[in-house]
């Protein structure tokens, strides 16, 4: 995912991974094996920072009854694999604490409900500061010396692209990454219209529109059609943008940042505003009404 599959460190990805190896002597990339994407992840790891130590795992879990089609809990799986890897390192026995970087852009980490229909578990928030802080308490209570950190919590995806330390490598590989929440449903093509795809496309637009050579299933999201501008995720972003324009960011945010674990709320509000402006630019570029 971009910068997410291009970017996990101990749940490590490209932009994140490259920036981390610039400042840390040892880094491992940990990821869950996903059909249609695994080979690219191996290739990315081999190219970042002269080559990352890279561990791919698959939980192979099977549950009775109807299988869950979504991947809403995937971040928890990533983090769990990261904790396993961190506690197996030689460094874990030698230092007081091992960092586990959960590298997610701030907008998707908060994942504020775009509309009233996306409250609660209807949207994934397993990189939200509240979730990560409570998970950290579990690790602390278990005596596991692993410190969870999201170094990009206050950056939009577009800002991550702009600020990446190796622009040449990013330009060569970013479009190969996967962001789509429905990647497998479209025969391993990115849909272009789900919220992660819109955030991806908005980030490319903010960084360098010429770099996005992705073959989206639904390229022209402004098309007046139920599968394009009328699709739920596209409409939800449009409704959110209209609500913010009418009532302001604070009224729209609601309880998205209502947590005692949020330390710098103004910084996160500013980041969300910038992320929404990236999305607004995307909708304007494609004429979404």
Image (cartoon, rainbow, N blue to C red):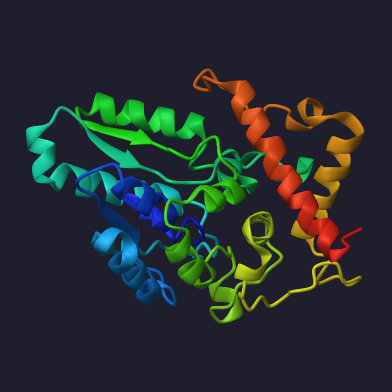
Q: Vertical placement of 151 versus 176: above or below?
A: above
Q: Nearer the viewer, residue 125 or 1?
A: 1
Q: Nearer the viewer, residue 22 or 281?
A: 22
Can I make out residue 143 in this image?
yes
Residue at x 32%, y 67% (from the top left corner): 47
Can I make out residue 256 in this image?
no
Residue 90: % across, % down: 8, 44
Quadrant position of residue 96: top left
Residue 103: % across, % down: 43, 46
Q: Quadrant of the C terminus?
A: bottom right
Q: Left or right of 283: which side holds 83?
A: left
Residue at x 83%, y 65% (from the top left corner): 286
Residue 76: % across, % down: 40, 47
The residue most toward the front is 168
Q: Left or right of 122: which side holds 143?
A: left
Residue at x 63%, y 35% (from the top left corner): 271
Q: Left or right of 60: which side holds 53?
A: left
Q: Left or right of 262: which side holds 20?
A: left
Q: How many marks?
A: 0
Quadrant position of residue 13: bottom left
């Amino acid at each position: 995912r971009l910068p997410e599959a291009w970017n996990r460190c101990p749940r490590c990805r490209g932009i994140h991974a490259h920036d981390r190896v610039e400042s840390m002597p040892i880094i491992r990339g940990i990821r869950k094996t996903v059909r249609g994407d695994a080979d690219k992840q191996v290739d990315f790891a081999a190219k970042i920072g002269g080559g990352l130590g890279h561990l791919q795992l698959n939980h192979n879990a099977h549950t009775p009854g109807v299988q869950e089609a979504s991947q809403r809990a995937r971040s928890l799986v990533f983090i769990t694999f990261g904790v396993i890897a961190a506690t197996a390192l030689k460094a874990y026995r030698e230092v007081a604490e091992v960092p586990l970087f959960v590298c997610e852009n701030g907008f998707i980490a908060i994942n504020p409900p775009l509309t009233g229909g996306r409250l609660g578990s209807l949207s994934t928030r397993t990189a939200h500061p509240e979730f990560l802080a409570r998970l950290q308490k579990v690790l602390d209570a278990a005596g596991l010396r692993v410190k969870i950190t999201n170094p990009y919590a206050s950056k939009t995806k577009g800002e991550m692209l702009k600020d990446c330390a190796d622009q040449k490598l990013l330009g060569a590989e970013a479009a190969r990454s996967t962001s789509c929440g429905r990647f497998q449903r479209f025969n391993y093509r990115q849909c272009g219209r789900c919220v992660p795809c819109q955030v991806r496309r908005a980030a490319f637009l903010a960084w360098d529109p010429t770099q996005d050579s992705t073959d989206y299933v639904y390229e022209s999201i402004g098309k007046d059609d139920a599968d394009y501008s009328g699709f739920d995720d596209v409409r939800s972003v449009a409704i959110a943008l209209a609500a913010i324009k009418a009532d302001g960011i604070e009224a729209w945010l609601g309880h998205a940042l209502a947590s005692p674990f949020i330390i710098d709320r103004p910084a996160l509000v500013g980041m969300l505003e910038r992320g929404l402006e990236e999305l607004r630019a995307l909708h304007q570029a494609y004429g979404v009404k």
